[in-house]
Amino acid sequence: MDTADLPTGAPPKDLEPTRQRILEAARAEFAAFGLAGARIDRIARNASASKERLYTYYRKKEELFSAVLELNLTEFAAAVAHQGADLAEFAGILYDHSVAHPEHLRIIDWARLERQEASDPPNALVDTFHAEQVRGILSLQAAGSVDRAWAADHLSALVFGIVSCWVHEPASAFSPQPASGGAVIAARRASVVRAVRRLIEPAAG
Amino acid sequence: MDTADLPTGAPPKDLEPTRQRILEAARAEFAAFGLAGARIDRIARNASASKERLYTYYRKKEELFSAVLELNLTEFAAAVAHQGADLAEFAGILYDHSVAHPEHLRIIDWARLERQEASDPPNALVDTFHAEQVRGILSLQAAGSVDRAWAADHLSALVFGIVSCWVHEPASAFSPQPASGGAVIAARRASVVRAVRRLIEPAAG
């Protein structure tokens, strides 16, 4: 899918080193504890920075959370760029990214659960990403490589649900997750790709 | 799937009325705020009960959380009982339940995010449910109505990911969710059933 509209601002390696450490510490903190549970003093300590320094960059915890979210999306866009026109293989790449960066999905899940007000402003980056996904699927349908029977926004949601199914299944919430060795991950990835391939195959005839 | 092993203890209507109100208030509180964010005094107030009365039933917030989880699973088991042997239609029933009781999935998601220790004991009810799902799929594969190419535990996870895809997609975390009228829900349900049907169809030939 075309990710040209996703954030292309300075990647974190161009940031001043202290600020970069603060962002990384904040990402780990938010992934572990969510927005409400995150502690600014712990983030500063883990970044070897003072709270005063942190506040010169980010005046509020919410600003820091938004900066982490933007960083995640920037990394995500870079990871999935340049993939081909095969939606099933794209799902495999999404799966790889979810395995390599579990904190990205955790932060999204925290954001959903902690969102109290339906009137909270939508996140423009996420909305842009979602719109790109849907446009990409429409293009693939027009080109004939994806069954046109699907509403494009439904298929986008289904692909994401398939990619993240092991993260979200109820058993994973209550049981220790066995160390997922390379063989487990490879088998799951193959199931993700196969599942999406079965969905998109244009009906015969 | 056979849900005979799921909890069949006294349903909430057999509970003493105050205790029943406490459980319902706790369910709303945990769904909104999670375990860490839930407030016992707010639960008691919303149940029109005293904190002292609440503590005679549940000594700790964690006990109350477990009781809510068991209540959810009991209701879930009742809702999906007596369904036929069609895994795709079963997915549709799961979807209906997720729409009717969004608080069930929210509480599971909270539990996963708030789980800090890999050594926390697994939840026996959830484990039992998961094992039943997998056994059910194995039976359907043996009977020939589900493609045997799938690892049964993979297919179980995929079905759940498909059923819950609109709950978990990133856009839903950051954008106001439009009121999902009956037409939207019916269309999504049809997509869920079709997606699972495409997965399970035994390969031709």
Image: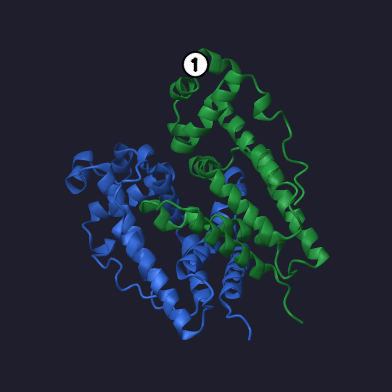
Chain colours: A green, B blue
Dot 1 alpha-carbon crowd within 10 angstroms: few under 14, some 14 to 19, many 20 or more: some
The C terminus of chain B appears in which quarter of the rendering?
bottom right
- Percent coordinates x, y for residue A3 in the rendering: 75, 45
Quadrant of the rendering where the N terminus of chain B is positioned: bottom left
- Residue A79: x and y, percent? 67, 44
Residue corresponding to mark 1:
A51
Amino acid found under the numbered disc labelled 1: Lys
Q: Residue furthest right?
A: A143
Count how many numbered circles sit on residues in the image: 1
In this rendering, position of residue B200 left or right of residue B33: right
Position of residue A166 relative to residue B117, above or below, is below
Task: Identify the secondary structure beneath mark 1.
Answer: helix
Pick whichever, B47 or B60, lies toward us.
B60
Q: At 49% across and 40% down in the image, what residue appears?
A: A114
> Which quarter of the figure has residue A161?
bottom right
Residue A180 seen anywhere in this rendered image of the structure? yes
| Circle 1 chain | A
Q: Quadrant of residue A192?
A: bottom right
Say above or below: A42 vs B95.
above
Q: Is residue B142 left or right of residue B88?
A: left
| Residue at 36% over, 53% down | A175
Residue B85 seen by the camera: no
Residue B50, how many percent across, how many down? 23, 41
